[in-house]
Image (spheres, helix red, strand yellow):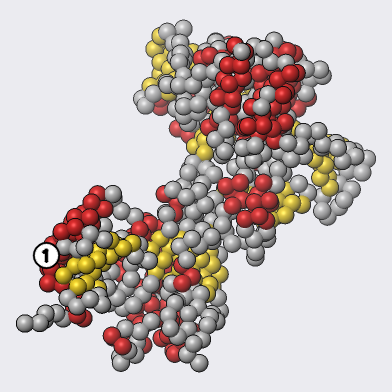
Amino acid sequence: MGYQLPRKTADTLFCRLREHYEIFAPKLFAGDGCFSDTDVIRYDKVSSLDEIEFDRRSDYSFKEALFAVNETLFYFTENETTIPSCTDKKLLIFLKSCDLHALKRLDAIYLENGPEDFYYKRLREKACFVLMDCGETCDTGFCAGMGTNRSDNYDLYLKCGEETVWIDCPSEELLSDLKEAGLNEAGETACAVTPNYVTQNKETVTLPKKLSVESFDNPLWEAYGSRCIGCGRCNFVCPTCTCFTMQDIHYRDNENVGERRRVWASCQVDGYTDIAGGGSFRQKQSDRLRFKVMHKIYDFEKRFGYPMCVGCGRCDAVCPEYISYANLVNQLAEEDAK
Amino acid sequence: MGLDINTKKAKKNAFRISKERGIGASRIRVPGGYLKAEILGMVQEIAEKYGNGIVHLTTRQGFEIEGIRLEDMDAINQMLQPIIELLDINQPEKGAGYSSSGTRNITACIGNNVCPFANYNTTAFAKRVEKEIFPNDLHFKVAFTGCPNDCGKVRLHDFGIIGMTMPRYDPGRCVSCQACVKGCKGLSVDALRMENDKIIRDEEKCVGCGVCITKCPTRAFTRSRQKYYRLTLMGRTGKKNPRLGEDFLIWADEDSIVKIILNTYRFVKEYMNPGAPGGKEHIGYIIDRVGFEEYKKWALEGVELLPETKVKECVYWSGIHFDR
């Protein structure tokens, strides 16, 4: 059951909702792409529906709404530490089905993999998720085969037309906040609202079933690794990559005061496997690539029972060296038959 | 009866008088070197009908149709008309070909239509200046290049325009991967360093090439909204004193550059040696004679530079002197 309401009404609603919510959504940043006169779509706080990029997949995933690129864990003075305060507001995060499935992976790593992560949890508990559908498949995604093309665990589903907005709000808490913001259930047209979803992609990926430690010797790693420049873009755009590194910053004017941050890390970038004493485990790009791919479709699944990769296809779209993770995985799968 | 040809008029009409008596060449200039492919077919048609079937790709992004008979110039001008129109070239009289050849074709590297390094649309800017300064008999050379790699070799021109971008840095998106630092050191001027896990840009050293931006994997480095240019002046080749153009403005804007070029035409009209061979004198030699201070006064007349634009107080050129 859902509602159909004029877009203007919906705009006002979301504007009022900002009293209690910080709204994160994909936004087009004109001119901020890698190259001159190109754009990038990434997440940011928005203040109206007009700012949201509903149609195209964002270049960077929703994860930065819950897991900032840089996050100060605590400030330190000589004998004391202070944890930065967290927003008082709730979070409303607009995302597509692939990313909502990625949320499950983030939760697995940060909440179900040993002790809960304090910083992730305090934001996660405040977060509500708004599903946006894909009118048609993106170029590189392969969600249908991964089973991530549909989601029903959204708090709100919202479809935005030029004049009309359709919503379905299974979350009672969010519904009551929407009502408080002015959603007039009696005044709006009640209608059945169900999310559309993509049933077929341009890209099809078959996961290999026979990966093992012996897969380490596959010549594919070297073939692809020799092309990789180790920039880490595939990790930074990935909605399921959760690695971070620690940085202790001592303020320039007073070395006794500073902060500890966690910062996104990439298993493809130099330094990721460096350890005290000067050791470094995976020095070759081919080893790093193998580690990443095996983690996405093998190691994670062994621990949690489902693949880590959600098939959003962002890594394939962003790679400056045109390395196709999808094609690499398919080639691994082809070897199953041998 | 011998051929009776006004060679001065023919040259101004963009025909070359070749070393073979009675034979010339038709010169077609392509502003910014950017053209619709259908023009190639038109060039071919002229070359096969009136020329010897050979076309030379000129050093200034044009075509030179070889082996035409000088008495066919009028007929060739008719066939040039659709090309001139497709290239949107200012023309006082339709069907009469090019009306002047003093100011040379404005050249441009491929720019940001295609090239990942380019910081602006070189052909669009070239065409803007083209509309402002053509047709013109004065000897000016203007060239555009997308980034400080200067593939367009603009420092060999009277006006060289080099694309720049002012890197904007968001430390909140920076993951300290140092792709920018390595990129700047390896490909550019080594203007970046990391301190406290964040990037510091040496603003004096930075040439605005944009390598840090293309290398950044997280969009911590992005381009300035404003497009910036380095304007180099009075580079030249030639018999007397070939030299590279020197910086005049750094972090300049498009409008200022257009105004400065137009102002320079006024300056040349005022100071050109009336007895110069062919009625033409290179701007650079005029400035050498009049002095840079006087030129600068004319060039900057009515120009409102951006606050961030750096202006060289004085410009000194070097180069090779064969004339001393």
In the image, A155 versus A104, the foreground residue is A104
Along the line of sight, which residue is nearer the eye, A326 or B304? A326
Quick check: B100 above or below B75?
below
* Residue B320, x across and y down, in percent: 52, 82
Q: Quadrant of residue A46?
A: top right
Disc 1 marks which amino acid? Answer: Ala
Q: Which quarter of the figure has residue B201? A: bottom right
The residue wearing badge 1 is B75
Q: Is residue B44 visible?
A: yes
Looking at the picture, tell me which residue is in the foreground, A135 or A302. A302
At 23% from the left edge and 57% from the top edge, which residue is drawn? Answer: B43
Q: What kind of element bears circle 1?
A: helix
Q: Quadrant of the C terminus of chain A?
A: top right
Q: Residues within 10 Å of mark 1 (few under 14, many from 20)?
A: some
Coordinates of residue A224 in the picture (x, y in percent): 62, 32
Expressed as whole percent of the image width and height from the top left, the position of residue A296 reads 66, 21
Tell me: residue B261, above or below residue A263.
below
Q: Is residue A261 visible to the viewer in this orientation of the structure?
A: no
Q: Is residue A285 left or right of residue B40?
A: right
Using the image, determine if residue A103 lies above or below residue B293. Answer: above
Q: Which residue is located at x 76 percent, y 46 percent?
A: B197
Task: State the image coordinates of residue A145 (x, y, percent, origin top left).
Answer: 53, 14
Q: Residue at x 43, y 17 (%)?
A: A166
Mark 1 — on which chain does it sit? Answer: B
